[in-house]
Image (tube, rainbow, N blue to C red):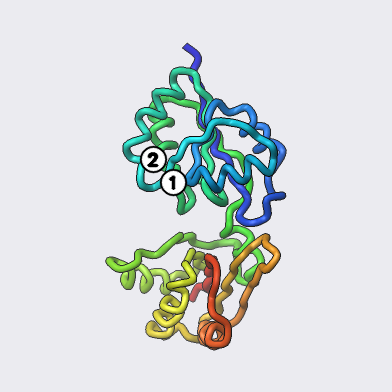
Amino acid sequence: MNLGRLDIVPTPIGNLKDMTERALEVLKSADLILAEDTRTTGKLLHYYSIDRPLRAFHLHNEHRAVDAIVEQIKSGMNYALCSDAGTPAISDPGFLLVRACVEAGVDVSCLPGATAFVPALVVSGLPCDRFVFEGFLPHKKGRQKRLQALLEEERTVVLYESPHRIIKLLNELVKYESSERKIALCRELSKLHEEIFRGTVAEAISHFDEKAPRGEFVVVLAGV
């Protein structure tokens, strides 16, 4: 029996022209595309005139959907997995499916492509030869303990944060005596209104006193 395969397909983090030719070829040939949000991925497919079946695969259904998807791939189906933006499984759904496919002996391939933290790290002006990627901090339980541990890191720290919690994060950094720590805050990367703030934590707070934060942020924080 010929097994199918799972292709992990990065999608643009803002600029729709950032799709690679190979990614487009994979999407065009997939038997089915798994999408974090079928509306978001549907717009991407429409932009590139790709007409393939779509199925929702997100944080709320991935646990119960994984087994059935693996069985379908094992039967010979070729599936492509997309998140709303960037590379699936990086702070997005996908890890559980990849693990299940690997355990089942299914071929898994991840295409190179867009992800938000790499360009943010590179343009931050902070050391990027050694870094730690944390993704999203816990909202409540364990947040303070995790943050304190990260503030002891010698490596550059990369976080994701929402516009609703970015001020909270900056104030937490001040609380832990890191107001003079160098930081870069990146939003709308690859889009028309891309913004990159570089300075200290204290300067970042002053910046947002004058300009309300909007959009998802990549936070790049200097190590000790």
Q: Quadrant of residue 56?
A: top left
Residue 210 or residue 135, whichever sits in front: 210
Up/down of 147 relative to 40, above or below: below
Q: Residues within 10 Å of mark 1 (few under 14, many from 20)?
A: many
Q: Amino acid at mark 2?
A: Leu
136 to the left or right of 182: left
Residue at mark 1? 93
Q: Residue at x 47, y 46 (%)?
A: 89
Q: Residue at x 56, y 59 (%)?
A: 117
Label annotation for residue 96: 2
Point out residue 168 in the picture as x, y percentages from the top left corner: 41, 78
Q: Amino acid at mark 1?
A: Pro
Determine contact: label 1, label 2, CB under 8 Å.
yes
**Element marked by disc 2:** helix
Q: Residue at x 62, y 78 (%)?
A: 198
74 to the left or right of 210: left
Label annotation for residue 165: none
Up/down of 78 relative to 210, above or below: above
- As drawn, the residue found furthest toward the top would be 1
